[in-house]
Amino acid sequence: MNETQITIDGSQLKTDVKDANTFKGFGYISCNNSSRLLLDYKANHPAVYQQILTILFGGKHPLLRLLKVELGDDANTSSGTEPATKRRQSEPANVCRGAGYQLIADAKKIQPQLKTGLLRWGEPGWLKAQWRQVKSADPDQLVPESAFEAMYQWYKETIIAAYKTYGYLIDYVDPDRNETKHPMFGFIKWFAKRLQTDTTDFPADFPIEAYHQIKLIAADQNYETNFGTGMIQDAELRQLVQAVGYHYNTDDGPDQPYTQLADKYHHEVWYSEGIAPMTSGKYRIRASAKTGIGGTQSGLDVANRVVKSYYKSRRSLYLFQPAVAAYYPGVNYSHKELITAQHPWSGYFEVDNVGLQIIKHFTNFAKSGWAAESAWRYLTPACYSGVLGTENLSQNTQAASYMTLMSPDKADFSTILVNDSPKPRTYTLNVTNTAAAAKPVYCWTSTGPNKDQAAYDANLMQLSAISAVVSGQVSFTVAPYMIATLTTLDRRQDPEVAYHEILSSTSNSVLTQSDQVLYADDFNYSPAFLKARGNTPLYTTDQGGAFEVVQTTTGPALQQMITEQQRALDWEYSFAPNFTLGDDRWCDYNVALTFKFDHTTQQNSQDGNYLGIGLREQTDVKGRLTSAPYVFKLDTNGYYELIVRQQVVTFGYVDLLDVTKAHLLQFGASGNTLSAQLDGQSLVTWQDTTNPTYSGRIKVGCGYYQTQIQNLTISRPADGQISTQRVDNLAPSVHYSGNWDHQVGLGNTLWQRTLSIGTAGPETKVQFEFDGSGFNLIGHQLHASQLDIYMDGRIWQYALSPNLGQDKACHLQVANLSQGHHQITLQVVTGTYYLDAIEYLK
């Protein structure tokens, strides 16, 4: 039996170290387009929007205490773009663009004491020339000091605009670039002094003194710890920078700089970007590895990161990137969130109830926040983690891992115990020098279901024991793949602590407006609607550039706003302007849009001047138009091409194309047939006979020109298929027998990061049932295999060979069945078969 002794000694609690050891809990980074669709929930389903925010920010024990937003630059910073508040140096800052600033305002209505932060990934075009060397190996020397003031003014004017528009002042600012390898120590010090002494060009009612008190947080590095070392070596820098943070790495640097900054100099240290659980807990419990609600990148892994990052590097605040996935799935880093909000037309959302409850094991049983709020503090000698790894804590997981939080008056404590291993561990708490020693200890636990329990959440947040402290000791055994909180707080009658499954009150319906029209938009929104959203229409998520509604002489249009002159200095890379729209369950449809080329902007652009439509997009890791498997592009010179899986398969020319006039471009897919027309003239008809994709959203893209789009319509043919539902391979409605390997926590190009792999055999079967007229089987097939398909109790097809293909590809479609209820059994008869998801058709 693994046994661990923990000493809970109230005399060891330090309450005179400012915010170095206050338990700040958790936060949320709104960046990279990750909150974009929340604007549409707010517009269409305000009650659902409020519910989502309340889950995160509400109640007596709020889950999140800080919201940090990206200072955007109109370029893709991993999973989408955040719009720039200023696109020209002379333009007033507009914080209505994007979701982040008004998300803060709405969250602060629920939690007025919510802290806020601001961080940039890249630089908008008007700063590009002076700041180009920020991406060099020595930006501190190569970016001239003459460039500093313009950068400072961008931050300042954005902060002022947020105050004027929404009434709040940003609390923390990082002047440097996100995840820099080479911190700009000189600029950070310059920025701090400028912020603290600036007294000019403020609005009359602006709180200048409070502005001077904005704290600096730096340098948001990824793994690197050299900024911490720089802080230790520079007393002036320590005086000017109040908080420090870095990403993903749970360990400290070789000379323990961050531990020193907290313990010796009393600085706040943050885990300033980390994952939320990957693969929802309700799917994890079916993994063949039998890790329950644990395993690499699970909620228990995240809990271990919280524990270990404090023990090893004194991180007292953990920020989720993101907490809410309000972008379309398939973008970079998909399926790592607590809440999924990707269906704003219906209001449907999903909560990872397992992940949420694991985080509540920390926040339900301690007051999170800062010293001014009487937040609980870490009892540092009673914190430890022997789990190994730097980011993914997947080694030595059977080791002890625990942390202890104590109230400032030493009257209560809570100890969180994490066991992400197959072996139990017994902990004995030795309680002394605290009034808590006279109180009973309540043990709350969360783990996966027992073998005889069907519900994935049957054992979440359960009061497992109430024990007295006898002779200063109390013991508890933490079962495999369990998190436990031992607390002296009596939460038995607290309705916020009692577990209840959070489910969406709306159904997950497909986006359709009529039998014939899936979606149409003429962009004729009210002025008030557009002003509140920075001119953003419904349901578009920009993956490059910026698409906003403008008024033209012929009516409203959706215009791409960024020219080459305004093109950002990328964080890492980005592609030409494009946006994604719609429901990934759309199958057969035709996109029709009226557009007009920008023929007046004179510039050299390597991307060219074109308009493109993409069909059936499911995965968009790079944020580009050709992430869609089928793309039709038309250039201003009349050249057009059909691109299939990033390869040009046919091309041609439109003679005498008049670029000064509006044109109607149509591009559609029905089954495996693609067709494109311009102004009613057929340009392309083509069939995909090798590996067709049958479902997905649309993408629209253009060059860095101010191309305008009007009257966008996505219509469905009368006999066209549509997917009514997609279920994951590990959904409870999918049943397996025989030789299957169910994997979780895989790459972000898989649905829910899960995959089921079946090896041929007489009992290797998968069964499901549905109401409809067909189904799609989704998942990459690396090698040839064969399936026998049984339908409604009878053999339907022998030895059917799925198509070879990549992640999320439809490797087999069965369509045009009689509409009704069907029971399906698939038997793997040869080879190895991979299943990621199933789509039901009608």
Image (tube, grey):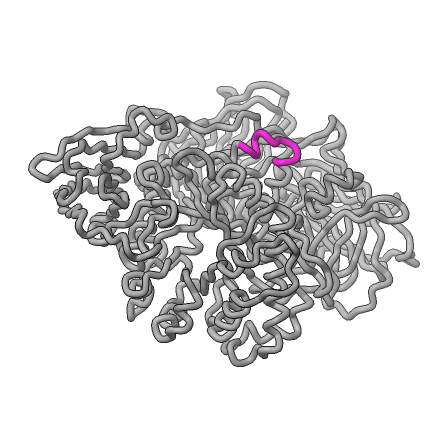
Name the residue: 59% across, 61% down.
155
Residue 648 appears anywhere in the view: yes
- Most extreme residue toward the left is 471
Q: Which residue is rendered at x = 86% and y = 63% of the image?
A: 600
**Majority secondary structure of magenta residues:** helix
State the image coordinates of residue 172 (x, y, percent, origin top left): 49, 57
Considering the image in quadrants, where does the C terminus appear? Answer: top right
In the picture as drawn, the residue positioned furthest to the bottom comes out as: 141
**Left or right, residue 334 beside residue 402:** right
Q: Which residue lies at the image location 17% right of the left edge and 50% below the top edge?
A: 11
User: Which residue lies at the image location 30% right of the left edge and 57% below the top edge?
Assistant: 17
Visible in this render: residue 399? no
248 up-or-down from 477: above or below: below
765 or 772: nearer the viewer? 772
* Residue 641 is covered by the magenta coloring: no
Q: Give x and y (percent) for residue 467.
A: 16, 31
Q: Is residue 448 left or right of residue 580?
A: left
- Measured as percent of width and height from the top left, residue 322 is found at 49, 47
Q: Relative to 712, is 627 above or below?
A: below
Using the image, determine if residue 62 lies above or below residue 317: above
Give coordinates of residue 493: x percent, y percent. 32, 24
Give the magenta part as a residue range: 41-50
Q: How many marks?
A: 0
Q: Give the left or right position of residue 416, taking residue 142 as reference.
A: left
Q: Quadrant of residue 225?
A: bottom left
Quadrant that contains the N terminus: top left
Which of the 4 image quadrants contains residue 82?
bottom right
Up the image or down, 277 lies above or below 90; here it is above
